[in-house]
Amino acid sequence: AAEGFLDFLFNLKSRKVGWNWFDFVCVLASFIDIIVASAVAERSSGSDLLTAFARIGRMGRVVRLLRLARVLPSLRALVATMVLTMQSLAWALALLALLTFVFAVIMTQGTVAYIIEHQIDQATATGEAANLIRYYSGLATSTYTLFASVSGGISWMETANPLAVIHPVYLYLFLIYVVLIVLSFFNVITGFICESAFSNLQKDKEEVVEQQLRLKNVYMSTFSSLFDAMDSDGSGEITCAELEDHMSDDSVQAYFAHLNIDVDKAWDIFRLLDKDMSGSVSIDEFVGGCLRLRGG
């Protein structure tokens, strides 16, 4: 049982290992949810940290809907594309954070120097000075302001005007940041992520083709072995009589049943396999015919 469980989670050769981990996490989350819910039920207070975790656990049940991706090809392709582009998205966010941090340092230093030089009281400041303190008085505040300005959280004109109080250079630097992020960075990242998604989908199609070729090779090997077993005289060809003689064999019946062919109609099967109508079937005709009958 333990070996089967480990193979379920750590068999990297299986294409379902990702979904196996997803199922494992869902089951584990459900188990924890039951334990937390039982503990909360024994408490009289419902406002503690344990209750909060219980609520979050219940909200996490919605994630289980992703399991529908297994049976819906379009949804599965969409989810797979999103997962495969996460690495590109992570690097894009890291670059965005770096650029925003650099400009935030410049804006914060200018604001702090302006406040000290003019001895502005942050509590009583009014007008653009108050807005300057509001948006750029600290590194965290400046970073938040810059990100909100380029992501639609706030109008960039509202956050740009206070910088002109310090010096027009800071206003120009802010405009450079907006143009760099909105007109260049976002478009480049969008194109890069789309290209990555298409590349991953193409790789997935290539894997499907390779898998079909591997299955075809397996079937060819299997049919070749079946032909050798049916070729009683070792002539390299089988006749209709030899085919009829082996129709009572369970393995032969199983193969043809898999092809949805009635094993009682030996002559019809032989006629389908005998492509050149020579009265005998060679190994190439047998293998090729079986693949055609199977739809391969």
Image (tube, rainbow, N blue to C red):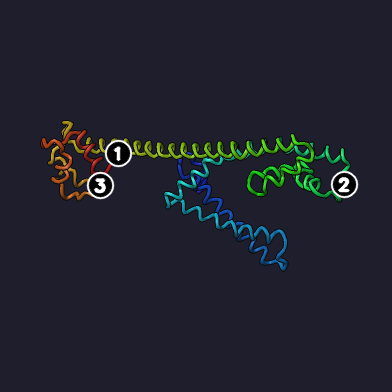
Numbered mark located on residue 219 in the image: 1
The answer to whether the residue labelled 3 contacts the one labelled 1, judged by CB atoms less than 8 Å apart, is: no
Q: What residue does disc 3 label?
A: 259
Mark 3 neighbour density, 10 Å: few (under 14) some (14–19) many (20 or more):
some
Tell me the distance, in whole angstroms, between the alpha carbons under discs 3 and 2.
Answer: 87 Å
Q: Is 291 or 182 nearer to us in this picture?
A: 182
Quarter of the image where the C terminus is located: top left
Q: Is residue 201 above or below residue 30?
A: above
The structure residue drawn at horizontal position 21% and vertical position 39%, both measured from the top left corner, is: 289
The structure residue drawn at horizontal position 58% and vertical position 56%, both measured from the top left corner, is: 60
Amino acid on which disc 2 is placed:
Asp
Judging from the image, what secondary structure is the residue with disc 2 in?
loop
Mark 2 neighbour density, 10 Å: few (under 14) some (14–19) many (20 or more):
few
Numbered mark located on residue 90 in the image: none
Judging from the image, what secondary structure is the residue with disc 3 in?
loop
- Whether residue 186 sits left or right of residue 233 in the image: it is right
Residue 43 place in picture, x, y as percent: 71, 66
Amino acid on which disc 3 is placed:
Leu
Whichever of labels 1 and 2 marks the residue nearer the N terminus, that label is 2
Q: What residue does disc 2 label?
A: 121
